[in-house]
Image (cartoon, rainbow, N blue to C red):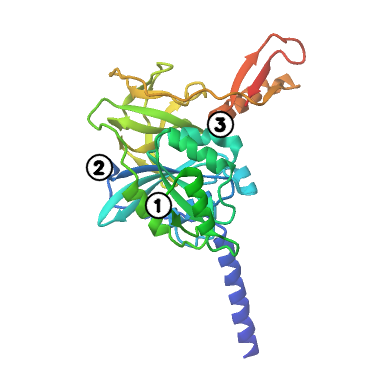
Amino acid sequence: MLIRTLTLLANKHALCKRLNRFSKIRFYCDTKKDIDFSKISVDKIRNFSIIAHVDHGKSTLADRLLEYTGAIRINSGQNQILDKLQVERERGITVKAQTASLLYKYKNEVYLLNLIDTPGHVDFSNEVARSLAACQGVILLIDANDGVQAQTVANFYLAFGHDLLIIPVLNKIDLKNADPDRVTKQLENVFDISHNEVLKISAKLGTGIDKVLEAVVTRLPPPTVNKNAPFRALLFDSSYDKYRGVLSLIFVKDGVLNVGDTIQSCYTEKVYEVKTISFLRPNEEPVQTIVAGQIGLIGCNMRSSKEALIGDTIHLVSQNVEPLPGFEPLKPMVFAGVYPFDQAQHVNLRSAIEKLALNDSAVTVELDTRLGTFPCPSIYYIIV
């Protein structure tokens, strides 16, 4: 009897260890939904960002929205799903804006919600500005304890300047020192936001998430686009994949794009064949078509960071279109000149710098050969 009891305890301990290990793994909900994204009408699309001061709970709210809409499993044991960079996960901050396409059923109608989680730190405000170009509204998230902070003000007026509708949301109402009434009055005094518009939630506990999604559907407008016009899209972000090269995140302003179509850059005039189109849910879900109003990731065998110009307009090669408004160039704040002491590493350095510039549009790079003497025949000036 004693031996049997000890065996059962040992098995239970082993099972707990296995469950512990699996709780640290990121789980995605890969259930195939019988939905053709290209058939979703424009009036059922909402493109929005979450903007806030740093550490006010943007990534936690994004996690709850992903869970509530079935994009990931509830209680998966993994936080900050959209924070994919190592530095983001180590420091608990968002550095690079990330996108997720969510399917949400409201009053028996399926809506496509394109969420862009943005950084809150002032150093990464460029990510916020680019993201807003693809949105029609924002969730302005405010800590119910800290209240309105510097980046709350900056991001509010950034969204206001883009003529976006703003949904004010108070987060962390579960905290002991939270004072929603005080912060609501702050919003009235600083931004002239009526107390009736303010939602009160706890992203950590999942309280009020349904009200946030309902507000996104009912308060925010669909994108102003034309599905029947010639295809054109805004390239507003990019990343690098070692197998597929440059991947471009686009907002389709007009028309339809299919895998196999030939596209052209308005800026470089280079021509590419579309190899892949996918939605981020939040992992890539391949599709054959993307239509006006939607946000998606395309791969077309771009190999250089100079080809993926942020703010560029993409169109079909056979059609002439008017370029979409791009982005204002940033004012550089930090300058650095770098070169490899061992010239055998020059190619590796150049490749690394190109990938850096590709993943962060705030970085610009210039090559200067005027100091072309040993040991540095060329210097890369990195400007941030």
Residue at figure coordinates x 52%, y 24% from the top left: 305
Quadrant position of the N terminus in the picture: bottom right
Choose top left, top right, bottom left or bottom right for residue 346.
top right
Mark 2 or mark 1: whose residue is earlier in sequence? 2
Of helix, strand and loop, which one carries label 1?
Answer: helix
Query: Which residue matches tag 2?
Result: 41
Query: Which residue matches tag 1?
Result: 197
**Residue 360 shows which numbered tag?**
3
Q: Separation of disc 3 and disc 1 at Cα? A: 35 Å
Q: In this view, does 12 lie above or below 177?
A: below
Amino acid on which the number 2 mark rests in the picture:
Ser
Q: Is residue 56 above or below residue 367?
A: below
Residue at figure coordinates x 34%, y 51% from the top left: 103
Q: Where is residue 7 in the image (x, y as percent from the top left)?
A: 62, 81
Residue at figure coordinates x 58%, y 25% from the top left: 354
Amino acid on which the number 3 mark rests in the picture:
Asp
Q: Where is residue 348 in the image (x, y as percent from the top left)?
A: 64, 25
Farthest residue to the front: give it: 189
Q: In this view, does 355 lie above or below 11?
A: above
The count of marks equals 3
Of helix, strand and loop, which one carries label 3?
Answer: loop
- Residue 361 seen in this snapshot: yes
For this rendering, which residue is in front, 163 or 328?
163
- Asked if disc 2 and disc 3 are in contact, CB closer than 8 Å, the reply is no
Packing grade of label 2 (10 A; few <14, some 14-19, many >=20) is: some
**Residue 12 shows which numbered tag?**
none
| Image depth: mark 3 or mark 1 in front | 1
Report the side of 301 relative to 262 (left or right).
right
Packing grade of label 3 (10 A; few <14, some 14-19, many >=20) is: many
Amino acid on which the number 1 mark rests in the picture:
Glu
Q: In this view, does 106 lie above or below 93?
A: below
Farthest residue to the left: give it: 228
